[in-house]
Structure formats: C-alpha cells, structure tokens
Image (cartoon, rainbow, N blue to C red):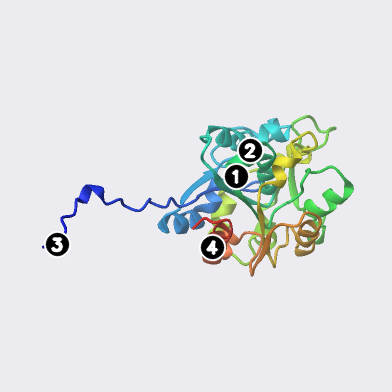
C-alpha cells in the first residue's frame, strides 16, 4: 500500500514577488509619459507606480511658484517615505528625473534596489560645478535662440522661473523618432517646468555613503537631441554605473522604443536579483 500523504504538510513554494518599478518623468512631463511602458510592465506581472512631480502632470501647482528642488521633488520623497521598512523599489528617472532619483538615493538608499537613469542627468551631487552644468543641462542652441517659452514668476527683472520648449519645435527636438500620435499627445499634455527649482538641485549636505550603496544602471538614448550622447557619456565616465545599455531612440524612448525599453528595465532588474 502507498504511504498516506497529508496534503496539509506539503509546503507550497514561496511565491516570488515581482519587483516594484517607480517611474519618474523629466521636466515638462508627467506620469502620462509612461503609459506604454506601464502597460507592458504590468502585463508582465510587475508592479508599476508613476509619479507626478510638483507642477507636473495632474498636479495643480503652478511651475512659477516652485522655487526649490526640494519642493519640486516632494511627491517622490513623500512616496518613498510611505514605503514600509522592508519594501524596496526600482527607481527609473528620465531626463531631469535623474536628479529626482539621485536625491531619493541620498535619502532613502535602504529602500532602493536599483536606480535606472534613462537618458537622464546623473550627477552625484547635483549642479555644484561648471562641469556639472556642462554635462547635465541641455544645450539646445543648435535649434536657434528662441527655443523656450519662459515664465517670470518673480518679475521680469528676475531669472525665469519656468520654461517649456515651444510647441513648434517639440517634435524636432524631443520626439523626432516617436510615433506622430505620441508627439501630438505630448504637445497637448506637456507643461512648463520649474527651471529655477531644477537649477537649485544640490545634494552636498546629503549622506554620500547612502547613495553609493544604491546600484545604478544607465540607459543611453543614442539619438538624443536634449541630453546629447556625449553628455551622457561624460556623466557615465564621472560616476560610473554598474551597467550601461544603449537604445536606438530619441530623447523619449518610452514613445519611440517602448518594447526595447521595457526589456532593458527587466534586464536591469535581473542584474540585481529581481525577475
């Protein structure tokens, strides 16, 4: 006779929890930028959260009233604070969103499995030197002297508080390889970004040991006209990440190469033991 088996004694293998991706947009963007990638990742079983930074997406704040980086980045900081002590996430920052995830890495390194910089500003201490500005700030002078629509919330005699690339130039500069319907959608949804706040992004008083404990991956956009490939290479050389991937895309790979981007994010997660 066969041995009687008590089904209650059979232990089921522990369910492996898919990693939680937190996607952070760049200047003028919003959570809406990630709609294609979010759909692909969630359909593959991953948990995905998309942040609206202050004055962006559906956040009602006026960019001209946001004068400090801490204020601008508060939605991400609040999100990180809300995570339980044993919950770790994978942060993905696009463009100026790289500054946002760097600040989070300084303050919440113990809650971050991996920081992924997507065609992003990757500066360990933010904008502290002329070299930081040269490497991390877009230079759009090749497109003329009248690229931005500026806002002067502190008065016409003060530095601009907000900026947005003029609508007639957005596709040429930001979305030149993206589907027409996506650049049309973006033109309807982008908002002026708080450039005064972004220029104040400095992390000199932060915990540098904490940020160095967070693994980093950089995803280059090879045809980027905003954060140019040579700027991306300079930042990679100055603060080397553990891995560098390259996308055949414009500055907006979430539109122009969403399937490849989702694949790279999955690959990056696997590199730190998440799959």
- Residue farthest front in this picture: 1
How far apart, in angstroms, are the residues tagged by discs 1 and 4? Answer: 23 Å
Q: Is residue 1 visible?
A: yes
Q: Residue at x 77, y 48 (%)?
A: 123
Circles 2, 1 touching at the beta carbon (< 8 Å)? yes
Circles 3, 1 touching at the beta carbon (< 8 Å)? no
Element marked by disc 1:
strand
In this rendering, the label closer to the viewer, 4 or 2: 2
Residue 71 location, x and y as percent? Answer: 67, 31
Q: Is residue 195 visible?
A: no
Few, some or many residues within 10 Å of mark 3 (<14, 14–19, 20+): few
The residue carrying mark 4 is: 258
Mark toward the start of the polypeptide (1 vs 4): 1
Direction from residue 76 to residue 133 in the image, left or right: right
In this rendering, the label closer to the viewer, 3 or 1: 3
Query: On residue 2, which mark appears?
Result: 3
Few, some or many residues within 10 Å of mark 1 (<14, 14–19, 20+): many
Circles 2, 3 touching at the beta carbon (< 8 Å)? no
How far apart, in angstroms, are the residues tagged by discs 4 and 2? Answer: 28 Å
Q: Residue at x 42, y 52 (%)?
A: 16
Mark toward the start of the polypeptide (3 vs 1): 3
């Amino acid at each position: 006779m066969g041995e009687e088996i008590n089904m209650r004694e059979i232990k089921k293998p522990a369910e492996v929890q898919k990693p939680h991706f937190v996607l952070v947009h760049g200047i003028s963007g919003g959570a809406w930028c990630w709609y294609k990638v979010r759909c692909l990742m969630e359909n593959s079983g991953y948990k995905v959260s998309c942040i609206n930074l202050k004055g962006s997406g559906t956040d009602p704040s006026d960019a001209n009233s946001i004068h400090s980086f801490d204020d601008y980045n508060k939605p991400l900081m609040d999100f990180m604070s809300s995570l339980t002590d044993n919950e770790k996430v994978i942060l993905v920052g696009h463009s100026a969103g790289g500054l946002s995830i760097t600040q989070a890495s300084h303050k919440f390194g113990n809650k971050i499995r991996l920081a992924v910089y997507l065609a992003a500003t990757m500066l360990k201490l933010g904008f502290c030197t002329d070299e930081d500005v040269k490497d991390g700030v877009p230079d759009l002078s090749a497109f003329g002297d009248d690229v931005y629509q500026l806002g002067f919330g502190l008065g016409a005699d003060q530095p601009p508080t907000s900026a947005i690339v003029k609508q007639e130039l957005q596709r040429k500069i930001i979305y030149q390889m993206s589907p027409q319907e996506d650049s049309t959608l973006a033109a309807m949804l982008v908002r002026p970004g708080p450039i005064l706040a972004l220029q104040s992004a400095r992390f000199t008083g932060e915990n540098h040991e904490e940020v160095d404990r967070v693994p980093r991956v950089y995803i280059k956009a090879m045809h980027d006209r905003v954060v140019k490939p040579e700027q991306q290479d300079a930042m990679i050389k100055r603060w080397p990440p553990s891995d560098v991937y390259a996308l055949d895309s414009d500055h907006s790979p979430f539109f122009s190469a969403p399937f490849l981007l989702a694949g790279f994010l999955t690959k990056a997660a696997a590199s730190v033991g998440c799959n």
